[in-house]
Amino acid sequence: MSSYRLILLAATCAALAIPFPSQAAPDPATTSASCAPQPMTMTERRITEKAGEGLPALIAFVHLTAPIYQVSVYDAVAMIDAQRARKDACTMVSARAKTD
């Protein structure tokens, strides 16, 4: 490698090693924006509907549509758990706001 390339590589590495100034993400438990309805894809809506019908219906749906949607049962359950966690967090925030 030429000396120019080495200098350019060293400068690039040094620039990338400098930490970027970052701002802390807002706490979702304290923001009301996190309680806004989250847009869901068609797949997420269908998985949510099947989860409402029960676990056997959800498992059957996921196994039937796995080649199409590329979603495993683990992914579907994680998606439902995340939705429930957001809902629970919003419920806690609104309960705190009412007691204050």
Image (cartoon, helix red, strand yellow):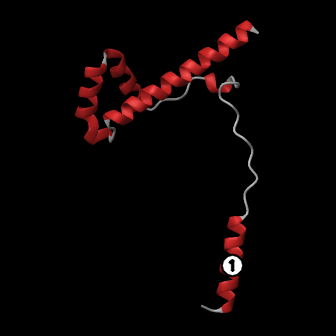
Query: Above or below — where is 90 with respect to 21?
Result: above
Mark 1 residue element = helix
Give the labeled residue for mark 1: 10
Quadrant of residue 48 within the rendered picture: top left
- Quarter of the image where the N terminus is located: bottom right
Query: Above or below — where is 63 with respect to 87?
Result: below
Residue sitting at x 26%, y 35%: 65
Task: Identify residue type, mark 1.
Answer: Ala
Query: Above or below — where is 24 with respect to 19?
Result: above
Total marks in image? 1
Quadrant of residue 7 within the rendered picture: bottom right
Q: Position of residue 83 (x, y in %)?
A: 49, 25
Q: Position of residue 68 (x, y in %)?
A: 29, 40
Quadrant of residue 25 within the rendered picture: top right
Q: Residues within 10 Å of mark 1 (few under 14, many from 20)?
A: few
Extreme residue toward the bottom, this view: 2
Residue sitting at x 26%, y 42%: 67
Q: Position of residue 44 (x, y in %)?
A: 41, 30
Q: Position of residue 14 (x, y in %)?
A: 71, 71
Residue sitting at x 61%, y 19%: 90
Q: Is residue 58 visible?
A: yes
User: Along the horizontal axis of the image, is 46 left or right of 6?
Assistant: left
Residue sitting at x 69%, y 65%: 17
User: Along the horizontal axis of the image, is 26 left or right of 49?
Assistant: right
User: Along the horizontal axis of the image, is 1 left or right of 73?
Assistant: right
Q: Is residue 42 visible?
A: no
Extreme residue toward the top, this view: 99
In front: 64, or 90?
90
- Quarter of the image where the C terminus is located: top right
